[in-house]
Image (cartoon, rainbow, N blue to C red):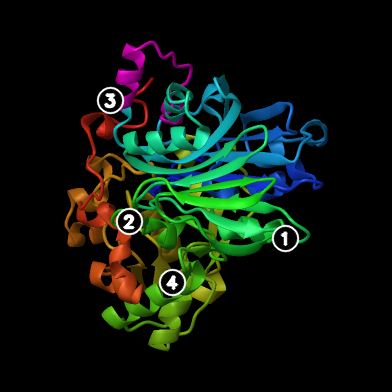
Amino acid sequence: MRTAGMWWKDKPKEECGVFGIYAPGKDVARLTYYGLYALQHRGQESAGMAVSDGRQLRLHKAMGLVPEVFQQRDLNELKGHIAIGHVRYSTTGSSSPINAQPLVFSYAGGMLGLAHNGNLTNVGELRARLASTGSVFQTSTDSEVIVNLLARYGQASLVDAIMKCMIDLKGAYSLVILTGDKLLAVRDPHGFRPLCLGTLPGGGHVVASESCALDTVGARWVRDVAPGEIVIIDENGLASLQGVLPRRRAHCIFEYIYFARADSLMDGFNVNRVRREMGRQLAREYAIDADLVIPVPDSGIAAARGYAEASGIPFEEGLMKNRYIGRTFIQPTQDLRDLGVRLKLNPIRDVLAGKRVIMVDDSLVRGTTSSKLIAMLRDCGVKEVHLCLSSPPVVHSCHYGIDTSNEEELVAARMPLEEIRRLINADGLYYLSIDGLLSVFGERRDDFCTACFTGDYPVAVTQSGKAGKFSLE
């Protein structure tokens, strides 16, 4: 988890990343390591990997970033031909070693490992039901509820058990599951969280949250796992079946706005192209008289380029990002409270002085970082600062796997636009409209979850689902 001063709190927090590989004859532990490295942006609290050689299932996981958790000796000991991996940002359950994934357990069918990206919206009810009939829980994650359900239905085949679980589970889940001889991938019937399939040269299959992980390990992207689908990979190759019928598609819109890596292909859309078109749409909606367009790196870069292209205003790198900031560093004292932002981003004075600037970012959650950035720009002699955002106002919490603030902490839920503009001291504040955002996706505009903007939740959220990330503590 990012703990540098206060700037890290001003964005929705990452979800998790999952990776799976079935590749006899290949060093699956190292390939999984590289795959998790490619997915590091999706979670920085903990990392883990489980590997099977057909007889034994080995597990290694710990708190920290991927290169901190796995050393050479760890990878040497993780022998096998099937592996799953996980990088975590906690959305249900605290940031602690016991909640790190994959979860590995023994049940009637043998040993099994599971890694989960997403968030269940009926976790409290499911856990209470399981506990009333004798289930024991060691973690405070919703993922362990899935583990217990699989064990409960374990008298049937694993695929049948998964299908029964999918009837019970509500909310978001993309799963990779490991047994002694199989790799399985499962996606919820709405397709909230991304999951894709690839093949390796010379044989073998890979499953990952994003296609950038396939590229990193040299796999060829084949397709996305479909909503409600179960994929089974073993010595016979790849098989697929529909676990539950697909429902209203509800791919997370924030994957395209902020979370996903720009080089990923996700549910038929290239993330970089989508973000660039969001910037073009911003320029169509708001014609601002300015000298420069600058991005807030990194997630604002593509949208800023799109805005510059559509408006004809020159694009410049006005903020330099320090790419060597780790997951944590010594926090500034109160007297140096602005240092956290300056350590991450620093303005290029010669580019900015005397200019009217359009600054493009992806979103505004609390407003603390934006206000500090604008103050820094003004200190550089900028004449005007107009903040353009490639998303609508975030006014509702997400319950499907993003750790957004409580609604009372969301600045757009508490203040009208003009008050927010004054709060951050911008000369102009412009949000992309919801219609403009969805127009980027053309005929598929209805395939996305926009609950954080509209309050239209595709899956009903129970009281336990609204209770927050520490509800199972």
Tell us which disc is closer to us: 2 or 4.
2
Mark pair 1, 3: CA separation = 42 Å
- Cβ atoms under marks 2 and 4 closer than 8 Å: no
Q: Is mark 1 on a helix, strand or loop?
A: loop
First reached walking from the N terminus: tag 4 or tag 3: 3
Q: Is mark 3 on a helix, strand or loop?
A: helix
| Amino acid type, callout 2 | Ala
Q: Distance between the residues labelled 3 and 2?
A: 23 Å
Up-down relation of residue 418 to residue 228 (above or below): below
The magenta stretch spans which residues?
Answer: 124-145
Disc 3 marks a residue whose amino acid type is Glu
Q: Residue visible at 16% across and 57% down?
A: 416
- Residue 114 position (above or below residue 338): above
Return the residue at label 4. Answer: 274
The residue under label 1 is: 218
Crowding around mark 1 (Cα neighbors within 10 Å: few <14, some 14 to 19, many 20+) is: some
Contact flag, marks 3 and 2 (Cβ < 8 Å):
no
Q: Are marks 1 and 2 in contact (CB under 8 Å)?
A: no
Q: Nearer the viewer, residue 119 or 236?
A: 236
**Residue assigned mark 2:** 250
**Does residue 56 belong to the magenta stretch?**
no
The answer to which of marks 3 and 2 sits earlier in the sequence is 3
**Amino acid type at mark 4:** Val
| Residue corresponding to mark 3 | 125
User: Left of 169 or right of it: where is 269?
Assistant: right
Q: Residue at x 80, y 30 (%)?
A: 77
Marks 4 and 3, how far apart at CA: 38 Å
Q: How far apart are the two marked residues, 1 and 4, measured between alpha carbons? A: 24 Å
